[in-house]
Image (cartoon, grey):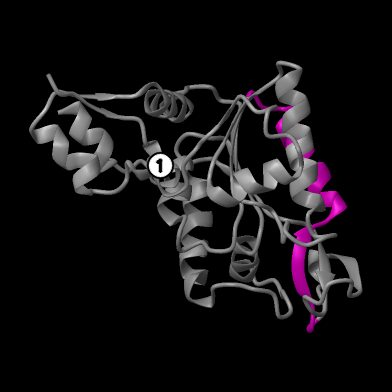
Amino acid sequence: MIFFVNDAFSVAHRSHASVTGLTDYVPSYSGRSLEKEVITIGKFLSSKNKRKIAIIGGSKISTKINLINNLLKSVNAIVIGGAMANTFLLAQGRKIGKSLNEKSMVKIAKKILSNAAKNKCKIILPVDAVVASNLREGGEFSEYSIENIPNDGLILDIGKKSIAIIDKEIAKTKEVLWCGPLGLFEQSPFHVGTASVAKTLSKMTKNGKIISVAGGGDTVAAISQSNYVNDFTYISTAGGAFLEMIAGQKLPGIEALRK
């Protein structure tokens, strides 16, 4: 007899013949890896723990609107970093120099901030930043308060005060979801914010203080670069599927198995 076993969570958000088609013709089951992904992410989302936060980074709000709006209902705080934080700072009327942002998403950012207040979910944005005038390797950089970003400045990482605020927030929580780097981690010295948060999560997890779940391609790359990849409670193997499940969306590959 022929069976179909899907153990590829990373493509579960695709409605491809190799993902959903075979389930119409042969007995179909999830593999252990896929099962663990679904259970782990599901546990975080459904947990009633009031001491639960999300750390969301990366460059674009547009790819994470649904994710953030879904998390607003289940966590008590969301840390926002990376270039996407620049758009939120713009929404608050801050000056961000020539930093990467999505001007077309400023209204969406304002709405997210409003929804967060309604759901009593604290939004934590950078209070300081590491800034350079260009992306040239080895170029000059300085740390500035968010209130004093130079007109020609590029925000490329969170600053020391922001790192301390995030560390303090992590110390108060029991469950953490991390998705997206907090700066230009691929280029030194702008990896420091992401590496520092990875170190804090690693230490707290190893000491049994928190449950840490991470996912998304750049997140995994950043954690691996910091050499803490084995210290988290769980690191997802997926990118898009992880983001869509966190956003509360139904994944075709999972739904095909459920039926």
In the rendered image, the vertical position of residue 221 relative to residue 89, given as above or below: above
Residue furthest toward the front?
A: 1
Q: Nearer the viewer, residue 48 or 62?
A: 62
Q: Nearer the viewer, residue 40 or 222?
A: 222
Would you identify the image quadrant in which residue 209 lies? top right
Specify whether residue 169 is painted magenta.
yes
In the rendered image, the vertical position of residue 62 relative to residue 133, given as above or below: above
**Residue 103 placement (x, y as % from top left):** 54, 76
**Residue 98 placement (x, y as % from top left):** 71, 80
Q: Nearer the viewer, residue 130 or 223?
A: 223
Residue range corresponding to the magenta coloring:
151-174
Residue drawn at 49 percent across, 56 percent down: 112
State whether residue 14 appears in this view: yes
State whether residue 166 appears in this view: no
Quadrant containing the N terminus is top left
Would you identify the image quadrant in which residue 10 lies? top left
**Residue 161 placement (x, y as % from top left):** 85, 50
Residue 247 is left or right of residue 49, and the answer is: left
Classify 10 Å Cα crowding around label 1: few (below 14), some (14-19), many (20 and above).
some
Specify whether residue 186 is painted magenta.
no
Residue 249 is left or right of residue 85, and the answer is: left
User: What's the residue type where badge 1 is placed?
Assistant: Ser
What residue is pinned by disc 1?
10
Quadrant containing the C terminus is top left
Residue drawn at 36 percent across, 41 percent down: 248
Residue drawn at 91 percent across, 68 percent down: 142
Q: Nearer the viewer, residue 137 or 127?
A: 137
Residue furthest toward the bottom?
A: 152
**Residue 184 placement (x, y as % from top left):** 72, 61
